[in-house]
Image (tube, rainbow, N blue to C red):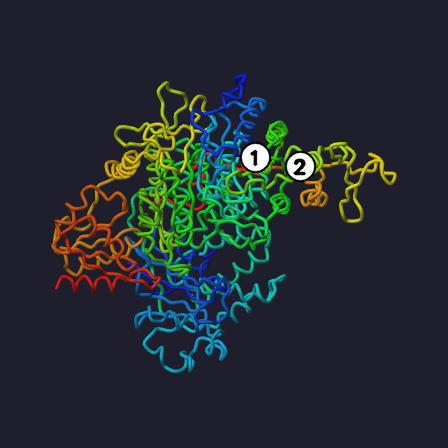
Amino acid sequence: METTATPKYTFKDFASDQEVRWCPGCDDYVILRSMQKALPEMGLKKEDVVFISGIGCSSRFPYYMNTYGMHSIHGRAPAIASGVKLANPNLSVWIITGDGDSMAIGGNHFIHLLRRNLDLNIILFNNEIYGLTKGQFSPTSLVGQKTKSSPYGNTQPPFLPGELAIGAQARFFARIGGNTPKEMTDLFIKAEKFKGTSLIEVLQNCPIFNDGCFSKYTDKAVREDKQLFVEHGKPMIFGKERNKGLVLNGLKLEVVTIGENGVTEADLLVHDAQDKDPTLHQMLVRSEYPLVTGIIRAFPDVTFEERVNKLTAAVKAGSSFAKTDDLFFSGETYEVK
Amino acid sequence: MIASKTKQKQEVLEAVVVRFVGDSGDGMQLTGTQFSDTSAMFGNDIATFPNYPAEIRAPQGSLYGVSGFQVHIGSVEISAPGENVDLLVAMNPAGLKTNLHAVKPGHTVIVDTDAFSKKNLEKAQYESNPLEDGSLDNYHVIEVAMTSLTKEALKEVEGLDNKSITRSKNMFALGMVYWMYNRSTEHTIEFFNKKFKSKPELIEANTKVLNAGFYFSETLELIPNSYTVAPAKMAAGTYRIVMGNTATAWGFLAAAEKSGLELFLGSYPITPASDILHELVKHKHFGVKALQAEDEIAGITSAIGAAFAGDLAITTTSGPGLALKGEALGLAMILELPLVVVDVQRGGPSTGLPTKTEQSDLLQALYGRNGESPVIIIAASTPANCFNYAYEASKLAIEHMTPVILLTDGYIANGSAPWKIKSVSEMPEIKTRLIKEAKETWNPYDRDEKTLARDWAIPGTFGLEHRVGGLEKDKVTGQVSYVPENHEYMTRIRAEKVKRVENYIPLLKTEFTDEGDLLVIGWGGTFGTLYSSLKELRQEGYSSVGLAHFNYINPLPKNTEEVLKRFKKIVVCELNTGQFASVLRMNFHGIEFLQYNKIQGLPFGNSELIEEFKKIMK
């Protein structure tokens, strides 16, 4: 690839000339702005960045980014993005998807992408509702939730995106509230640096069809008390007073208070995002109090491209075929005179 | 190796049809392939027709578990696997029962008598043993205890289990047939040496059994004479035997090399298309990127992603898979990206007849998408020209920036024939529309004046960042547009773009005569049978019958109407209920199209066609 220096960009360089058309007050604006701020920090050339989306409110995202992009069809962005990345591994490829797009119609592509571990990034806008089709329940909607398609309450138990993803062998999973742009920007940068498929679930408020769906965790007033923002190598502390923490009691996580019952900071779990064993990561994903945000899992593993490249190099080294003619005229041929 | 023989009387034949039948585990496909390859190397023209059940190992001895492989070899031009079997090799009663109808009285049947046990006869629903009840009196039956003779031949070979011993009886049959048609065993022995490289006992065993069969025939007075089919007159050059699916795969390899693009295949296993995937995954040395995807949809969508990023992108499937790919194909069409979709047609609807042939996806290919969604459709017509049409599909997709559907079918995909090898240097140029640098006034949907194709600005190209998508787009910028007039304009221009491809494809040719009483129309994989039927008909004195065989379905060749009007009657022959006939009726008003259709999962036979054509001309 070209060796010219990467220009110094600002967030404006990544904004396209299209008017952004999400509803006023939607967290999607926060995600868009966080991405436009994160990109200049990534050291990438603008022409090497590609956003691929499916269908849904979130999937309008590529139109607003001044990079290469494709707004594709419902659920298929992971497969399209895989093709882009395999065609040109030099590109930084981002999948933009929602809870309906990735967990319902595109569920199959989503899990297989994670299994393969291509080096690309997924931002999952989870608002626990279908917004663009105007308010049906989604695979992450809660049981009992009243929506246009469940007027008496939803009867389908939800997926937890992190649980499903780690079950499908996700190497990188992070979760972040839709109203914390600074942390979000930082997560985007870290996700891009991570080699392998990075999945970031954004808890995104839909002010029209599911307003307040995450407010018990994400409202400014309660955020610090209800969320544990984990960082690799650091003890699991949360709370306004920074005096709550997590310990392991048997096979369960338990919230403890530092200074009570002889508990000290040294007793708390220290977050190991890089552990190959996802058991504790799954417990963190499932925890309802505190809700765990930040990078829950970042296990470095061989990527799909690395496996393919290695194999291709080995086959090439052992082959006498350089041109197709070598193949066509090889083996059992015969002459007609 | 046995290269020649001495004493028996030899009879020279123009062409013969040999069919090997047995249980699906009896190795009939391998036996048939060996016989056809050996004959091709000898210089015969050949055509083959494998016919096997969908079950991998159907219950032994059952009627539905019969697997067959037919080979037509000739010193004359051979364009189809033939209809009347001259020699039937039946490894069991079920094979005999299901195939005897193809053998005309007076011709030869070889049977393995060891397989005609009470149990096997019952499984084949024979009430009495056909070898004893006189029902085969009109045939020349050669009874051979092949299983016992195979065991006998192998009694001194060490390290073989019972299963390996009985499984090699197909080589006994092959040895016999080699002797009968004066073929050398050399090619097959070479094949054993390669295939069983790490298992010398299997090389020894198979060679022994093959030779045993050969010598058995030579010394046996049961076989009155042996036949010679002289080499055919074929254009000079280097040849090899190819299966249609292999030829398809190689056509793509050639197109990638010629265009300077890397080849990307996104595919999901499906009968009878999987062999294209199997072939392409082998060729990592050419940088082929093959993704076995999680489903049919991921097969095509990964290819769309690869096309967006600048690869020659293809996806391979059969009818059910094409149905699943429909929405994504519409996306590729509106994005105006190059993409080739191969549909190796099989019997439908639904799961249908996975291992049998049919031409019933034509209308699906034309119309099986939401909205106005025209794509180029071409069809290969012989195993060997699958190479040319895979190449042509790639060329059209790349140069016209649009998806192309390439239709083949189970019959030509699994059939094999001699292929005069094409060097990539002989193939026509493929010019991509890639742009490497930003032009000042460039827009994503600017079009070439002649072809209407847009440019291919791939990610990684400085200054050309742009967004595409499945929403209707502005005719210049490609941005989302809901403007009513713009939608009509774009709908019409996408159709016009495909229509204009007619300026870049060959005119329709007719075989045998340019005008006359009857024009026989076919498309795709029926060419060989239609062509040989008309040849036979001419030999009977019918000189006023022509054949127009279509390889280009959408758009149709520009001179189609003119060709149609030069004949008094027209009959459209298809392995469906008349899909192409309805396309022609829609395009050419005031012309009467008669139909001849067959929907049995089988190719046409010459005699049914000839009979029909004679009836029409009465």
Give how far across and how far down residue A267 sits, in percent: 83, 38
Do we see residue B288 in this rendering?
no
* Residue B495 in picture, x, y percent from top left: 28, 39
Please report, as a chain letter, where disc 2 is located.
A
Farthest residue to the right: give it.
Answer: A262
- Category of crowding for the residue at label 2, using alpha-carbon neighbours closer than 10 angstroms: few (below 14), some (14–19), many (at least 20): many
| Residue at position x 88%, y 38% in the image | A262
Residue of label 1? A121
Instruction: Classify mark 1: residues with Cα within 10 Å, few (<14), some (14-19) or many (20+).
Output: many
Depicted A51 relative to depicted B115: above or below: above
Element marked by disc 2: strand
The C terminus of chain B, quarter of image: bottom left
Task: Describe residue A173's horizontal placement relative to residue B353 as left or right.
Answer: right
Q: What residue is shown at x 23% (from left), y 58% (from top)? A: B533
Amino acid at dot 2 = Thr
Asked whether, in this view, residue A88 is left or right of residue B101, the answer is: right
What type is the residue that disc 1 sits on? Asn
